Amino acid sequence: MINPSFLVPALPGREVAMQCDTDAIWIKYSPRLKHFIRKRVSDESSADDILQEVFKKIHSHIGTLKDETKVERWIYSITRNTIIS
């Protein structure tokens, strides 16, 4: 199976199964996530703060992704949970 381009195998000896190219994820998902967030949050500033928090969580929790074919579902799940928290 081919991994999405923003997921790369972890360096040898690392505990994390995958490492994340956050820039590639940002380019691909940030416009859609921003729209998704703005539909649920009343102001632009809060939406920007939530989007930033989402990407911090993506970067720090990429090792918890068990199935790289479900990256988009995983990202939106993080986004939804961040909005409601």
Image (tube, helix red, strand yellow):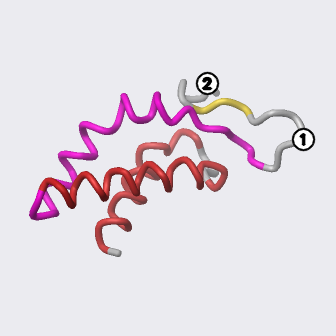
Residue 22, above or below 45: above
Q: Earlier in the sequence, mark 1 or mark 2?
A: 2
Write the residue at 35% across / 75% down: 85
Up the image or down, 31 lies above or below 77; here it is above
**Could you tell me which quadrant the N terminus lies in?**
top right
The location of residue 69, given as percent across then percent down, is: 53, 39
Find the magenta span and give its range: 16-43
Q: Nearer the viewer, residue 78 or 46?
A: 46
Q: In the rendering, at what x and y percent does residue 16 appear?
A: 75, 48
Q: Amino acid at mark 2?
A: Ile
Q: Which residue is mark 1?
A: 13
Q: Residue at x 15, y 63 (%)?
A: 41
The percent coordinates of residue 38 (x first, y second) are: 15, 54
Nearer-the-camera pick, 15 or 48: 48
The spot of residue 40 in percent (x, y) is 16, 62
Which residue is at the front of the view, 18 or 2? 18
Q: Which mark is residue 3?
A: none
Task: Identify which amino acid the numbered label 1 is placed on.
Answer: Gly
Specify few, some or many for label 1: CA neighbours under 10 Å numbering under 14, 14-19, or 20 or more: few
Quarter residue 37 falls in: bottom left
Q: Which residue position is annotated with label 2? A: 2
